[in-house]
Image (spheres, rainbow, N blue to C red):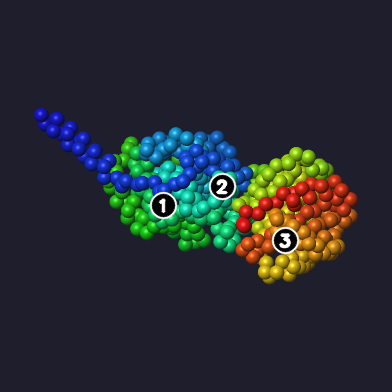
Amino acid sequence: MKLLSRLVIVITLTATTVAAQTKVTPPKNKYTPEQDVQIGREAAAEVRQQYPIINDDQINGYLDRLGARLVEAAPRELNNPVFQYSFSPVNLKDINAFALPGGPMFVNRGMMEAAQTEGEVAGVMSHELAHVLLRHGTANATKAQGFQIGALAGAIAGAVIGGGWGQVIQQGSQFGLGTWLMKYSREYEKQADLVGAQIMARAGYDPRDLANMFETIQRQGRNGGPEWLSSHPNPGNRTQYITQEASQLAIGPRPSQQRFLQTKTRLSQMGPARTMAEIERNGTVGGNTGGRPGGSAGRIGDNVPAPSRQYRTVQGGQLFTVTIPSNWQALSANNSIKYVPANGYGDFNGQRALTHGVEAGVARASSGNLDQATQTLIDGFVRGNNGMRVAGGGASSQLAGCRAIVTSLQGPSALGGVERVDVHTTLLSNGDLFYVVTVAPEQEVGVYGEAFDRVVRSVKLNDR
């Protein structure tokens, strides 16, 4: 009889513990889980191109196993079967981690190295997983109107990657969507903290480890500000309410720390990681090819293939779309993107040289008058390129259905001889100047002219 009474007490206590956890209701969302997956998949492809992903079996295997453990502990009512989870380590020193809609998660090496226990890594990953489960990315997008799936993916990728078109997207009211999508509200942050704590407890980790990691991130933030803080604002009293939630949860069997310690050792044996700021400043991410900030497209002086007769449509962040030859690649830089063939852009005499291709970008307009703003831009091009001069100026034109100006320039080519540069300019609705520049050696203008015309005619601006 005593044994029965004890059993009843245990069952009652367990039920109370489960019932006492804070109930979190997902916010309103007009998108479907399938659309979350599509958005996340497209944005993740951009991130994997531009971030230095670690390709190491031991480190990748560790992160995959830890991620799978946390997914298994996720609330079943939130864990939609269509979600497609992946867990990618990134060779960056910054203390950062982020998850995209539908499941892709990226964890910086700096986050893993800053953690003192596996529970601290699991805590940050659980928090990010909670954002996926609660569908906070597309819940934010629900508050905006008129944006299509592809545009959302581009905006999210732009906000995550930063620099380049991430900066362009942030300019003016029309270009703030990317950052807004990835910057969670304090309400969403608290929801992710609570659901993350619940996931941790079921997976065998003390949610107080999550609070400890947040305090580490906060301390680091006073010395330069980890990226994580900029998109995950502190709701206030974070340690207090996570500790309170932890006191109401039954923590499962704690897993071994052995793999965590082995992974920390493995990371310490790698060469030093760089920060994202260093990568953007040096113009290369290393370890990835194609579409990366400040990358090159081969070697200046090697053979440059003629433009393909096959074309594909690509997005310039959320600002525009353009159709380019299928054998050209996209390379982003601060406030611009270059579309170039192999060996059309690279190092030359210690500088980067564009010999063949197209550049599209945004410049702060010196005036609301298109002619004056264009003249300022052209003056900058001439001053910044030795030997360049205006060869024909100020012809009226159209760009993306708007009034535009075409200015022709000539200058010395890195390949020898003269290059032809045509600059197309128009004003954006926020007053900035949008430009498209075409570049080719004078003797190859006949080969590239048709492709340039098609590219320029295909530009569509999304700011109207």
The answer to whether residue 222 is visible is yes
Q: Quick check: 7 left or right of 249?
A: left
Left or right: 234 as drawn, with respect to 55:
left
Compared across the picture, whether 16 is left or right of 135 comes to left
Dot 1 or dot 2, earlier in sequence: 2
Kind of residue at disc 3: Arg
User: Pointer 2: residues within 10 angstroms few (<14), some, or many (20+)?
Assistant: few
Between the C-alphas of marks 1 and 2, the distance is 23 Å
Question: How far separated are the C-alphas under marks 3 and 1?
Answer: 43 Å
Q: Secondary structure at mark 2?
A: loop
| Element under disc 1 | helix
Residue at (10% x, 29% y) in the render: 1
Residue placed under numbered mark 3 in the picture: 403
- Of badges 1 and 2, the one in the foreground is 2
Q: Which mark is residue 188?
A: 1
Of tags 3 and 1, the one toward the viewer is: 3
Q: Earlier in the sequence, mark 3 or mark 2?
A: 2
The numbered disc on residue 148 is 2
Q: Position of residue 314 (x, y in %)?
A: 67, 46
- Residue 47 is labelled as none
* Residue 143 position within the rendered picture, expressed as x and y whole percent measured from the top left: 47, 53
Amino acid at the residue labelled 2: Gln
Q: CA distance from mark 3 to mark 2?
A: 26 Å
Asked if the residues shown at circle 1 and circle 2 are in contact, with their CB atoms under 8 angstroms apart, the answer is no
Residue type, label 1 = Tyr
Q: Position of residue 203 (x, y in %)?
A: 37, 38
Please, is residue 147 above or below residue 63 in the view? Answer: below
